[in-house]
Amino acid sequence: MHRGKGMKFVGDSRVPAERKPNIPKDYSEFPGKTEAFWPNFLLKEWLVGAVFLIGYLCLTVAHPSPLERVADPTDSGYIPLPDWYFLFLYQLLKYEYAAGDFTVIGAVIMPGLAFGALLLAPWLDKGPRRRASQRPIAAGLMLLAVLATVYLTWESVDHHDWEAAAEQGEMLDEEEAAAVEEVDTEAEGYQIYSDQGCIGCHGDQLQGAGSAGPALFDVPYDAESIKDIAVNGIGEMPADQFDGSDEELDLLAEYIASGGNPEAGGDSEGEEEGETTDEEENAEDGEETEE
Amino acid sequence: MLQKIYEWVDERLDITPMWRDVADHEVPEHVNPAHHFSAFVYCFGGLTFFITVIQILSGMFLTMYYVPDIVNAYESVKYLQGEVAFGTIVRGMHHWGASLVIVMMFLHTLRVFFTGAYKRPRELNWVVGVLIFFVMLGLGFTGYLLPWDMKAYFATVVGLQIAESVPVIGGLAKTLLAGDPEIIGAQTLTRFFAIHVFFLPGALLGLMAAHFIMIRRQGISGPL
């Protein structure tokens, strides 16, 4: 580069007035079939990128990204699962000598050693040889680490109950969402529902809470059976959950039997729903005609 | 016309040397899949960069709809996914890209390791690469919470429990990330959003710049 006396600049700037021509290097003198990055090689890379992008978009279209129901921190029964690339660590922490009293081993020492060794690999493997076969210790340890990671991830996937996981996170479908809308939280029955702690496992809209308790807006029981269940329990639901007067129990059972909407009434509910749907349809038809 | 504009700018800013630095470097035969098909293993780094660019672009579009608070976060994601034109594609690309970038980066790391490309004089570039790996895992962890659905929330609860189990600094680290020693809630979501959108991408861009400048300076490692 030209420096010092005799240099001319553009105005009072430090940009030299004499300009370098924009001519690419000639690679014909380089060893082998070396080629220029711009534009020869970039064009090929571009094609590979385009093919990759098509595959990527196909994946996106074929498998829309998942979304479960909105986070509910009170659902203590939810089986958590991190994203797949953290599963090896998640699985490691399930083993006896890497969990409980030994959590420090599983959460800090083992990953710390592995990732520390990865970070410092150039100083742990200092020899000048590059071929994997010429440095069996480094290559072997890396291979072992990769196999261990794959194995742990596999075990984690294998142990997880995918069906239960899909069920516990499911969003309410349209019918259920409509039923939740109908729930009358002003009613006397709702007050009892809330005070008696039913709300803890069956949700604040009778929608249930995943694995803790099922939804209650569409139960196949009449008021009498519901009274019995509230007092004596059923399935996984323990007995003696209800602790109030008989009148309150009556009100609660009525409330739940009516799907959280006692004013619509238990048996007549179906008919009324039918009517509203007809009306809604008529209204929609009307709108369409107006348009 | 374009030539005139280029010359006008070049006269004032002398951009030709910069442009030649970017464009003018050789691609040796042993890394070119057009000559040896097995050289496709050298593509993983470039694909990692390609997906990173997609992640940045799709993420920028996602923030046009996403609201980082516990009342609206879930609803805004649901709206984006169900109502917005191409919203499901944009979110899908960001979702799958997060997995693909980890896969590509892992393969790139293995390629560099098994070809011994991290050896003298390229030690520093290896260290920067491993730091990029950590930043990417951090981006995956913080991004996972943002839709604020069940699996997002409980995965974060588990992740923070693991952070908490680290002796001495564990509790502090958890408070720093979650915004509270006990509660994982509103504060956690805004903190994870800030970390995911500002802190880690800032670190990532700086590290990637260092990664690429070092490659330009040292050139690609020779054939085995």
Image (cartoon, coloured by chain):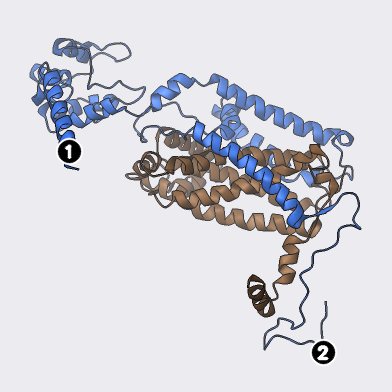
- The residue where tag 1 is placed is A289
Q: Chain letter for brown?
A: B
The front one of B28 and A269 is B28
Provide residue B221's location: percent of width, then percent of height: 83, 49
| Disc 2: host chain | A
Q: Chain letter for blue?
A: A
Q: Is residue B17 above or below residue A265?
A: below
The front one of B115 and A137 is B115
Horizontally, residue A85 falls left or right of residue A148, namely left
The front one of B204 and B171 is B204
Do we see residue A192 in this rendering? no
Horizontally, residue A220 falls left or right of residue B207, namely left
Do we see residue B198 in this rendering? yes
Residue at x-position 80% and y-position 37%: B38
The earlier-in-sequence mark between 1 and 2 is 2
In which image quadrant can residue A159 be found?
Answer: top right
Count the numbered circles shown: 2
In which image quadrant can residue A195 be found?
Answer: top left
| Number of residues whose C-alpha sits closer than 10 Å to that of mark 2, classed few (under 14), some (14–19) or many (20 or more) | few
Q: Is residue A284 above or below residue A207?
A: below
Q: Is residue A218 above or below residue A149?
A: above
- The residue where tag 2 is placed is A6
